[in-house]
Image (cartoon, rainbow, N blue to C red):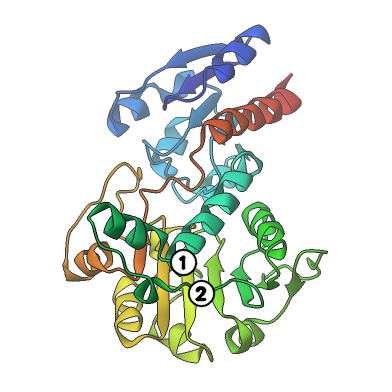
Amino acid sequence: MKILLLDKNHPLITEQLLAKNFILEEDFTSSYDEVCDIIENYEGIIIRSRIPIDRNLLEKGRNLKFIARVGAGMENIDVKAAREFGIQLINSPEGNRDSVAEHVLGMLLILMNRLFIASQEVKNGIWKREENRGDELLGKTVGLIGYGNMGKATAKRFSGFGCKVIFHDIIPGLSDEYATQVSLEELKKTADVVSLHIPLTSETHYLIDEKFISEMKNNFYFINTARGRNVETKSLVDALKSGKIKGACLDVLEYEKSSFEHLETENEDLQYLLESEKVIVTPHIAGWTHQSKEKLAQVIVDKIIASFC
């Protein structure tokens, strides 16, 4: 099979697929239109997020057998069109679930214990103790929205900190030793921490908005390592200002470019997030460790070989 690699990834993809006699061609610079011109020559695509795989491109790729995304989210692919054309879709959420879970926990501990603020103060000659009194995770109810690979790995971490972990998912019967499945209404009644682990779809776009936040019984900490557009930023900022959201850990932002390589815009809401002591922001790196880079690639290779060798 002839495969087009559109993004740089771990070299094990090339090494292992070449060893299985796949033909690989790398193209990390061509534009969308240029890819459309050549896509009919390939039976497979391996991507991250650089090029949108829409219906137009898929129609031109009449020989495509699979599209493999090195990562979890598939919103950059027209999934409906791909299935209509009989193209197999492959992704690798198993590869960075542990990285995401550790990032979630790390951000929240830093925020709740004011570790970054206190460290910077001491380095600048400021010694404040009472002002930097922290908040403990022990005994808190953590509500996860979404219980796939990321949600399960995150629940496992929180359960070790003496938290009660609950989750909401549209698929029933997912409760396990780490977390209990509840309705969204029950989660809103009891959660002290809310963490998103969902894909971006028409149903989850702006899931966290003014209405959702107002329906939360408790003031709460909020974590988003899913997708920026799962959250209406203005509503998040308003809730931070009012104290309804006690603090936010954001690895993703509504204003990211679709390739996730940089921010597309600047405005007052974004500026508030960047300046607030109540907010920790990281550049879409929750699933971005040295270990996950290799694991993501290995999962993709294993799935391709299992299906096409």
> Residue 111's image quarter?
bottom left
The quadrant of the rendering that contains the C terminus is top right
Give left or right: position of 159 versus 142.
right
Residue 129 image label: none
Q: Residues within 10 Å of mark 2 (few under 14, many from 20)?
A: few
Q: Nearer the viewer, residue 307 or 160?
A: 160
5 vs 158, left or right, is: left
- Look at the picture and state if 257 lies above or below 168: above
Query: Alpha-carbon neighbours of circle 1 within 10 Å: few (<14), some, or many (≥20)?
Result: some
Residue at x 45%, y 84% (from the top left corner)? 213
Residue 253 can be seen, yes or no: no
* Residue 232 x, y percent position in the rendering: 35, 73
175 or 110: nearer the eye? 110
Residue at label 1?
A: 113
The earlier-in-sequence mark between 1 and 2 is 1
Which part of the image, by quadrant, shows the N terminus? top right
Give percent across and percent down for residue 65.
60, 29
- x 47%, y 58%: residue: 107
Q: Could one spot residue 282 in this view of the protein?
A: yes
Q: Determine the CA span between mark 1 and mark 2.
A: 6 Å
Q: At label 1, which amino acid type do we have?
A: Asn
Residues tagged 1 and 2 counted as in contact (Cβ below 8 A): yes
Residue drawn at (36%, 29%) of the image: 36
The amino acid at mark 2 is Asp
Q: Is 278 located above or below residue 256 in the figure? A: below
Give whichever of 99, 40 is nearer the camera: 99
**Outermost residue to the left:** 267
Residue 264 vs 44, above or below: the answer is below
Q: Position of residue 29 (x, y in %)?
A: 30, 23
Q: Which residue is mark 2?
A: 135
**Displayed quadrant of residue 188:** bottom right
Q: How far across and down, in percent of the image, does residue 86 sit?
A: 62, 39
